[in-house]
Amino acid sequence: MLKSLQGSTVIVTGGSRGIGKGIALRFGEAGLNVLVVSRSEADASAVARAIGPTASGLGADVSTPEGCSAMAKAAIDRYGAINVLCANAGIFPAAKLTEMTPADFDHVISTNLRSTFLSVSAVLPAMTAAGGGRIVLTSSITGPVTGYPGWSHYGASKAGQLGFMRTAAIELAPKGITVNAVLPGNIFTEGLEGMGPDYIAKMEASIPLGRLGTVADIANAALFLASEEAGYITGQTITVDGGQILPESLGALEAMAG
Ligand code: NAP
């Protein structure tokens, strides 16, 4: 049982659906004040309403400095502190190298990586004043560990988050701020609902634990990294993928089944 984070405040970027919504709901359940952020204020507020009176939504684009400043200001105005940042917002449009434009590349890097820098920078004054804080990034297995056709820009952004994290963790350690990352594998979100049972079964077949991850699987890892008990962990990653990156070949998966 982790010590209570009741009354602390978390900002969850990309909290309106998918993994971020799972994180927001889990942190809300743990008793934190939750600022749910996405470009759509209506969607962010709907998640906040599902959490209850200790949560609220904000429409902000975290790939811009203005959006991130507005986010930090809203958390301070509404809750008086920022104890935890879950920098989770991200996009994953596919484009193979033969068709990828510089604008496609910049858009993914800006939304996934630049936003990491901007949102961390925006919360630093409040965390520094409070004498500490927790930053949890949502990276991916794609990029840091694996590759997938169509996602060279996405993989670069997700690996880039980890490069950013390692130096940020050193720079922010004297301020009592830890910076860690969760690396999800294939997680079942609303976006996958329409893909059909064959598509899901194909994905599950490559996962030793035999199922896609849930948003709660990721949220639990994020909550641990935000806890007091994780206070001596910084600059590290937790892969939450059901063992997906482990098999060295299709043969390894077949041998497992046999
Ligand atoms: P999702 O369902 O598409 O949700 C993305 C969230 O980010 C939404 O709340 C979206 O809301 C928000 N967002 C996007 N661009 C934004 C911006 N510029 N400013 C503010 N908010 C923005 O995605 P997901 O599958 O949950 O993925 C969440 C994170 O997990 C991403 O970083 C992704 O790379 C990572 N991940 C996902 C998986 C997976 O299997 N799903 C696996 C590995 C890693 P708006 O559109 O309203 O802005």
Image (cartoon, grey):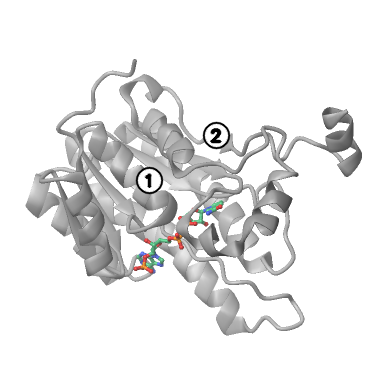
In this rendering, would 215 be left or right of 194? left
Residue 92 quadrant: bottom right
Quickly name the residue at label 1: 22
The label shown at residue 10 is none
Q: Residue at x 59, y 75 (%)?
A: 105
The answer to whether mark 1 is within 8 Å of ligand 1 is yes
The first of marks 2 and 1 along the sequence is 1
- What is the three-letter code of the residue carrying label 2? Ile
Mark 1: secondary structure: helix
Q: Residue at x 41, y 62 (%)?
A: 115
Q: Residue furthest front?
A: 197
| Residue 191 position within the rendered picture, expressed as x and y whole percent measured from the top left | 50, 62
Mark 2 and mark 1: span between their CA atoms?
17 Å
Q: Residue at x 64, y 59 (%)?
A: 155
Asked which secondary structure carries label 2, the reply is strand
Image coordinates of residue 227 in percent, x first then y, are: 33, 27
Looking at the picture, which amino acid does disc 1 mark? Gly
Residue 43: image location, x then y, percent: 27, 64
* Near-viewer residue (233 or 48): 48
Residue farthest to the top, as pictured: 1
Q: Are marks 2 and 1 in contact (CB under 8 Å)?
A: no
Q: Quadrant of residue 253?
A: top right
Disc 2 marks which residue?
238
In the image, residue 27 lies at what x, y percent? 29, 38
Placement of the N terminus among the 4 image quadrants: top left
The residue nearer to you, when weighing 248 against 72, is 248
* Rendered-image quadrant of the C terminus: top right
Crowd tier of the residue under label 1, counting other residues whose Cα lies within 10 Å: few below 14, some 14–19, many 20 or above: many
Left or right: 246, with 250 as reference point = left
Q: Quadrant of ligand 1?
A: bottom left
